[in-house]
Amino acid sequence: MVTRTRFDDSECPVARSVDAIGDWWSLLIVRDAFDGSRRFGEFQRSLGVAKNILTARLRTLVAGGVLESVPASDGSAYREYVLTPKGEALFPVIVALRQWGEQNFFAPGEPHSQLVDRRGGHRLRALEVLSADGRRLDPDDTTVHKISTR
Amino acid sequence: MVTRTRFDDSECPVARSVDAIGDWWSLLIVRDAFDGSRRFGEFQRSLGVAKNILTARLRTLVAGGVLESVPASDGSAYREYVLTPKGEALFPVIVALRQWGEQNFFAPGEPHSQLVDRRGGHRLRALEVLSADGRRLDPDDTTVHKISTR
DNA sequence: CTTTTTGGTAGCATGTTGCAACCGATGTGA
DNA sequence: TCACATCGGTTGCAACATGCTACCAAAAAG
């Protein structure tokens, strides 16, 4: 568990998100969950993480409402960790990280795992940040309003 | 610096991205950089991070090609940290984290900082994951191909 | 009924973080 | 130009988090 008292009450949504999933393992656990991992052992083998660390991370993610622990779907007495709706809402985050990684950390032609459209099997379209009326926005086209009500 | 030998050679783009920016401070530094912070002191005051930690993080981000150190724009002898093109490409990641935070960590009406379209000042459109031909995709509509060439 | 798998926990060594003190180079005001 | 404040760090230390290995009980498999 990271010691962080400073941003628990931050008014910045990015800070609260990072607080929930912004460590090395949590994001990869969520990625694996999107890829279909459900069982403790699946995450452990896939990630190679120490079991006590995995235990702690899964607990944090469950406490944070990203995952939930449900009875195993195969009828066994074990439990599974599945994404909640809140966890599923991380899909654009994972896709954004994946696309950034693809574009910046692989040499042309270097093999890498790829997220594809199940129907047709094609690569996804690159994420675009759009204005309310649909214009593509660059960082310079945006600004942060310090406080606002929703 | 996190000890991570396991994923340096990973073929998963998400893992490589997380390797570069997947810790508590790096993402917030990048967020501040998007919001206009450039100087060491700006980051330090904005984040409240210890100076030695900030030094280490900035060095890592520069080494990773996310930030670069340039002469100060005000003509002083100091230096500034600005986003490289690779760093700017993190824009969708930050926006995704921001939108996830807004939707999941704030009570209705609770004040929070907001990213708006400079032209018009409206909130941004929610990020959408799209197929190559423009259909909205949910996690279930996608699958990971283990290895592929680009 | 024996063995293996699963999903952990406990203890310990090591790595990382946060804090406070300190420091030289730079900028600023008189 | 001389004192003083600010900037951008570095250093040492204490606290905390992480990773590894060993161990264990419940469940499943054979």
Image (tube, coloured by chain):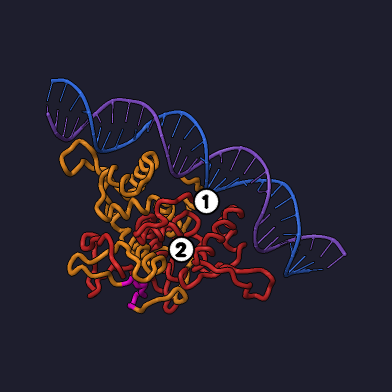
Chain colours: A red, B orange, C purple, D blue
Q: Which residues are magenta?
A: B126-134
Residue annotated with mark 2: A113
Inspect this view and state whether residue A109 appears.
Answer: no
Pinpoint the chain carrying mark 1. Answer: B
B131 within the magenta span: yes
Judge left or right: residue A41 versus residue B149.
Answer: right
Per the model, the C-alpha gap separating discs 1 and 2 is 16 Å
Tag 1: residue type? Arg
Tag 2: residue type? Ser
Task: Tell me where residue A46 sits by quadrant.
Answer: bottom right
Judge left or right: residue D28 versus residue B76.
Answer: right
Q: Which mark is residue B6?
A: 1
Dominant SS type (magenta):
loop
Residue B78 pos. (x, y %) = 23, 37
What residue appears at the point 39 percent right and 69 percent down from the top-left corner? B107
What residue appears at the point 39 percent right and 66 percent down from the top-left corner? B106
Residue nearest the observer in this picture, B145 or B87: B87
Judge left or right: residue B53 versus residue A39.
Answer: left
